[in-house]
Image (tube, rainbow, N blue to C red):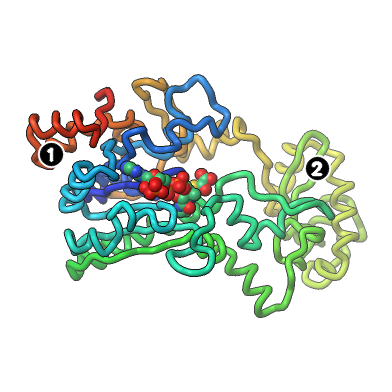
């Protein structure tokens, strides 16, 4: 049995950060009901990601598996009444609305906890719920820039470069996930619900704890002209190196060993702990030149045998076909009723007794509206009335 079986989550979130947090709970067995506007959650219809020819955006498919969809107009009194009924049956509520929206919709913590004091209410925002930046849009790229993370990445004297993934969204999602689990644990002990707030700015700032402490305590400023890491004075060589056919990574190579491998007497005589800092440019120059003489596979075999920290720089095809990734079962595939086979990373944590499970793919908008309304005790007549008033939307049931 999955660990969160019997836990009900109402997921009112949009885009990535909220939906991913809710999906983590769903993968652990929670009954996650995605509460969507009657037109469907924003990301369903976006073309972002470049994948075309699908009825549902592929990013949406990757963030909303294992959820049921209740499509309801929270701006209508009837729709809102449905949500408040659902809240009585819920354990967790997640929203990542723009500041002020939750209150305007009447789904703020004060309102919902009055209905269900045991509720764990997860509020996700861009910058916090109060303060000078509260009105600014919370978007991944903006936060990568504002958090200082971007200052350390990029080449030479060029501009700052963001990570090519939605790093801030993901970190915020994982923080919300752990916050929800901790609050459920507290509720298990005491019966008490609470509000769990996490914002993107604090999430991305906090994961830079080493780099920021080196700055505040060590007074060392990150400079992207110097290094592949915000620690400017990382022991050399540390970075991405070109080989005769591609690139490899090399971290903290002991200089005496590296010198022997690269055939450099100069390196072989160096001491990692002293020269690794004082002779950085020379070490990089020797290493760069030497690594151009063999292929990545050849170098990786040599470094592996020497017990040194080196690795491949994969494209996604190489990653998916990597023997360790295959061995781990990192990717899962499922058959979606309208989109066919979907291959996507699964849930990475393995539990020896309560494994995660992929039960179904991302839903059609409103696919489970009738099913959920019936579970909430509404009869056919009331359901027809809600449909008639367009307070709810009923999608095709593809189960
Ligand atoms: C991402 C956002 C900038 C998107 O802003 P918006 O487009 O304005 O979306 P919002 O959800 O906040 O609200 C849109 C409107 O929809 C209304 N709304 C929402 N749900 C409903 C339902 N069910 N029924 C009726 N109306 C609804 C809501 O009241 C708002 O209307 P009005 O009441 O009339 O205003 C913001 O939500 C935000 O800053 N969120 C916090 C940070 C966060 O989680 N960011 C997403 C990370 S993902 C990301 O960065 C990325 O993918 O890249």
Q: Residue at x 58, y 56 (%)?
A: 143
Q: Secondary structure at mark 1?
A: helix
The reply to whether residue 17 is visible in this rendering is no
**Mark 2 neighbour class, 10 Å CA radius: few under 14, some 14 to 19, many 20 or more:** some
Q: In front: mark 2 or mark 1?
A: 1
Please provide percent x and percent y for residue 392.
24, 34
Seen from the viewer's position, the closer of residues 146 and 219 is 146
Q: Residue 90: give x, y in percent of width and height.
A: 20, 52
Q: Which mark is residue 375?
A: 1
Quadrant for residue 107, please give it: bottom left
Q: Can the viewer see residue 347 in this picture?
A: yes
Which SS class for mark 2?
A: strand
Q: Earlier in the sequence, mark 2 or mark 1?
A: 2
State whether label 2 is within 8 Å of ligand 1: no
In space, the residues marked 2 and 1 are separated at their CA atoms by: 59 Å
Q: State the mark number for residue 176.
A: none
Q: Whole-percent x and y of residue 206?
A: 54, 66
The number of numbered discs placed on residues in the rendered structure image is 2
Q: Is residue 30 depicted above or below 207 in this figure?
A: above
Would the CB of label 1 be found within 8 Å of ligand 1?
no
What residue does disc 2 label?
A: 242
Q: Residue at x 28, y 44 (%)?
A: 74
Q: Residue at x 84, y 69 (%)?
A: 275
Residue at the location (56% across, 64% down)? 205
């Amino acid at each position: 049995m999955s660990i969160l079986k019997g836990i009900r989550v109402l997921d009112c979130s949009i885009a990535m950060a909220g939906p991913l947090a809710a999906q983590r709970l769903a993968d652990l067995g929670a009954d996650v009901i995605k509460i969507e506007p009657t037109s469907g959650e924003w990301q369903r219809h976006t073309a972002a990601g470049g994948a075309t020819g699908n009825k549902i955006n592929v990013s949406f498919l990757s963030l909303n598996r294992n959820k049921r969809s209740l499509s309801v107009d929270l701006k209508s009194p009837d729709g809102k009444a449905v949500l408040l009924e659902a809240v009585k049956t819920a354990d967790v509520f997640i929203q990542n609305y723009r500041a002020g929206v939750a209150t305007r919709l009447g789904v703020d913590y004060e309102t919902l906890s009055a209905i269900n004091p045991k509720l764990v209410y997860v509020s996700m925002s861009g910058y916090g719920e109060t303060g000078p930046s509260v009105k600014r849009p919370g978007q991944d790229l903006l936060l990568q820039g504002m958090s200082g993370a971007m200052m350390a990445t990029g080449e030479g004297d060029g501009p700052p470069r963001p990570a090519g993934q939605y790093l801030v969204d993901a970190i915020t999602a994982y923080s919300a996930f752990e916050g929800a689990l901790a609050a459920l644990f507290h509720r298990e002990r005491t019966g008490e619900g609470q509000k769990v707030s996490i914002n993107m700015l604090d999430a991305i700032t906090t994961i830079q704890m080493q780099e920021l402490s080196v700055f505040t305590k060590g007074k060392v400023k990150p400079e992207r002209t110097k290094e592949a890491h915000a620690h400017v004075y990382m022991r050399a060589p540390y970075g991405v190196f070109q080989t005769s056919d591609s690139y490899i990574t090399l971290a903290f190579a002991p200089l005496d060993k590296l010198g022997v491998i690269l055939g450099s007497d100069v390196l072989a005589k160096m001491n990692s702990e002293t020269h690794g800092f004082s002779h950085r440019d020379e070490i990089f120059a020797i290493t760069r030149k030497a690594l151009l003489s063999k292929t990545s596979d050849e170098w990786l075999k040599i470094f592996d045998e020497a017990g040194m920290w080196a690795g491949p720089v994969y494209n996604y095809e190489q990653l998916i076909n990597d023997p360790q990734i295959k061995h781990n079962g990192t990717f899962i595939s499922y058959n979606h009723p309208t989109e066919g086979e979907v291959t996507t990373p699964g849930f990475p944590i393995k539990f020896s007794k309560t494994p995660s499970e992929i039960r179904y793919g991302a839903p059609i908008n409103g696919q489970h509206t009738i099913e959920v309304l019936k579970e909430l005790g509404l009869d056919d007549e009331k359901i027809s009335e809600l449909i008639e008033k367009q307070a709810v939307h009923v999608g095709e049931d593809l189960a």
